[in-house]
Image: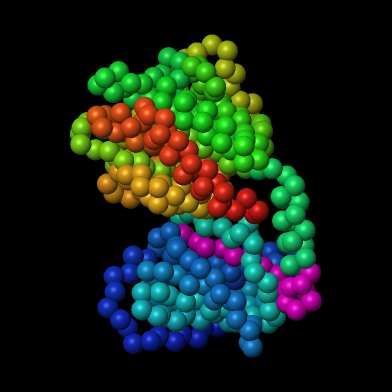
C-alpha cells in the first residue's frame, strides 16, 4: 500500500466526559489499493469494536469506535489520488468518531472489504476499510449486483461441517459416573446434522462413528468440502464440581484468559495420540490451514460465535461464569473456514452431566445452534 506524506486533520472534541476507555487511537492513514480502491486505516491499542455511517453533502465515511479515546496529537497521513480529502476525530462520550471527508460518495462497504489486523512489529491493531466511488446510479448498479448475488447465494445451499470432538482412543472429558465427552458430542452432532439437512443446508460430519481423527484432518474436511462454516462440538470438565455452563471459542494466537489456554492445551493434546491411516496434509493444504489468521475469516468466526451465545442465552441455557465468548489457539479451528468451538456444558457438574445425556436438553442445544446459523450472514 502506497502511503503519501500529505496530511490534514480537523479535530473537534466535545467537553470530555468521565469514562474509562479500554482502547485508544494510535494512528490514521489512507492509501491507494489496486482496482481504484481507497484504503482507510485506523490504528488502535486494542482490538476495535466499530460501526459505520455514510453521510452526504459533503460525502463522509464515519467510523464509530466504542470505548475508545482519541488523540489530538495524531496527524493522519493521506495518500494522493484517493477518495479521502481529510480525516477528523470527534469524541462523543466514550465513543470516538473518525470522520473521513470524501471527494465522492461511496456505497456501503461489503464485509469482505473490511479487515481487522493484529499487531505486527511496531503497529497496533489496524482496522482497514477498502472502498471505491459509488453513489446514485453507481449505487443502484451496486445494489442490483448485490441483489443478484443474494439470489445466487439462495440457490446455492450453504455448506456446514460439524465436528464431534475427540473419538476413538481419545475419550475427551470423562465424568465421575463414566460419561464420555466423545459419546455426548457425537449424539448432538448427529442431531444437528439432521436438523440442518431438514432446513436445506448441505452438511458433512468429520466423524459419524467412534474413531480418532487428527486435528488438521478435521479442519481439512471443511477445506475439501468448501465449507461456509465449521462447528466443533465439545463438553467441558473442571476441577471445581460447581463449575457449569456453556462457553464458545474462536481462534486466536493468544488465549483470552488462563482458563481458555488450559482448555486449548487439553484439546490440542489429542494430536499426540498416533493412529495409522490418517495422512498428513500436503504443503499447500498446510499453508491453507494457517490462513485463518486472515482477519476477515476471524471476524466472521466472531460474528457466528456471538450469534450462538445470544441464542443459547435466549433458550435459557446456562452460561459458564465469565465471558461467554473467548479466544484461544485451538488446532481444530486452524483453517480458512469461519468457525467456532462450542463447549456445550460441564460433565464434571453432576446436574449438568445428567442434562447433557437427555434428549430434551440435546434438542434444546441443537435448536439454539440452528437458530444462530439461520441468522448468520453467509452472503459475504
The residue depicted at 40 percent of the width and 85 percent of the height is 13
Q: Is residue 93 left or right of residue 186?
A: left
The residues colored magenta run: 124-141
- Can residue 234 be seen? no
Image spot of residue 71 (x, y percent): 40, 77
Image height check: is 56 above or below 112? below
Q: Is residue 258 magenta?
A: no
Q: Quadrant of the C terminus?
A: bottom right
Q: Is residue 36 left or right of residue 54?
A: right
Q: Nearer the viewer, residue 339 or 363?
A: 363
Which quadrant of the structure image shows residue 103? Answer: bottom right
Which quadrant of the structure image shows residue 114? Answer: bottom right
Q: Nearer the viewer, residue 262 or 72?
A: 262
Image spot of residue 154 (x, y percent): 71, 50
Image height check: is 31 above or below 317? below
Image spot of residue 163 (x, y percent): 52, 30
Image height check: is 35 above or below 288? below
Q: Quadrant of the N terminus?
A: bottom right
The residue depicted at 55 percent of the width and 46 percent of the height is 373
Please state the total of marks drawn on the protein image.
Answer: 0
- Can residue 35 be seen? yes
Residue at the outermost front position:
360
Amino acid at each position: 500500500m502506497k502511503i503519501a506524506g500529505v496530511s490534514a486533520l480537523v479535530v473537534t472534541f466535545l467537553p470530555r466526559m468521565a469514562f474509562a476507555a479500554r482502547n485508544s487511537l494510535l494512528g490514521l492513514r489512507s492509501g491507494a489499493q489496486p482496482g481504484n480502491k481507497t484504503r482507510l486505516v485506523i490504528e488502535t491499542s486494542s482490538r476495535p469494536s466499530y460501526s459505520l455511517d455514510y453521510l452526504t453533502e459533503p460525502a463522509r465515511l464515519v467510523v464509530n469506535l466504542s470505548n475508545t479515546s482519541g488523540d489530538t496529537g495524531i496527524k493522519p497521513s493521506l495518500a494522493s489520488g484517493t477518495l479521502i480529502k481529510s480525516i477528523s476525530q470527534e469524541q462523543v462520550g466514550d465513543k470516538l468518531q473518525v470522520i473521513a471527508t470524501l471527494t465522492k460518495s461511496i456505497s456501503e462497504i461489503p464485509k469482505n472489504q473490511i479487515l481487522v489486523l493484529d499487531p505486527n512489529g511496531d503497529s497496533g491493531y489496524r482496522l482497514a476499510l477498502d472502498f471505491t466511488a459509488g453513489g446514485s446510479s453507481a449505487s443502484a448498479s451496486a445494489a442490483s449486483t448485490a441483489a443478484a448475488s443474494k439470489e445466487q447465494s439462495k440457490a446455492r445451499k450453504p455448506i456446514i461441517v460439524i465436528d464431534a470432538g475427540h473419538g476413538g482412543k481419545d475419550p475427551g472429558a470423562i465424568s465421575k459416573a463414566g460419561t464420555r465427552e466423545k459419546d455426548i458430542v457425537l449424539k448432538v452432532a448427529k442431531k444437528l446434522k439432521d436438523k440442518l439437512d431438514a432446513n436445506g443446508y448441505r452438511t458433512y460430519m468429520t466423524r459419524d462413528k467412534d474413531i480418532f481423527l487428527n486435528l488438521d484432518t478435521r479442519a481439512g474436511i471443511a477445506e475439501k468440502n468448501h465449507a461456509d462454516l465449521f462447528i466443533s462440538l465439545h463438553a467441558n470438565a473442571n476441577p471445581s464440581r460447581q463449575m457449569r455452563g456453556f462457553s464458545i471459542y474462536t481462534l486466536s494466537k493468544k488465549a483470552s484468559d488462563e482458563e481458555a489456554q488450559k482448555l486449548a492445551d487439553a484439546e490440542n493434546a489429542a494430536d499426540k495420540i498416533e493412529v495409522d491411516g490418517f495422512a498428513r496434509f500436503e504443503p499447500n493444504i498446510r499453508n491453507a490451514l494457517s490462513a485463518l489468521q486472515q482477519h476477515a475469516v476471524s471476524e466472521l468466526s466472531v460474528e457466528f460465535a456471538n450469534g450462538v451465545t445470544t441464542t443459547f442465552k435466549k433458550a435459557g441455557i446456562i452460561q459458564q461464569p465469565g465471558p461467554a465468548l473467548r479466544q484461544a489457539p485451538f488446532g481444530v479451528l486452524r483453517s480458512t473456514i469461519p468457525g467456532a468451538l462450542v463447549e456445550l456444558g460441564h460433565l464434571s457438574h453432576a446436574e449438568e452431566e445428567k442434562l447433557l445425556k437427555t434428549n430434551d436438553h440435546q434438542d434444546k442445544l441443537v435448536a439454539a445452534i440452528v437458530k444462530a446459523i439461520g441468522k448468520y450472514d453467509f452472503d459475504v
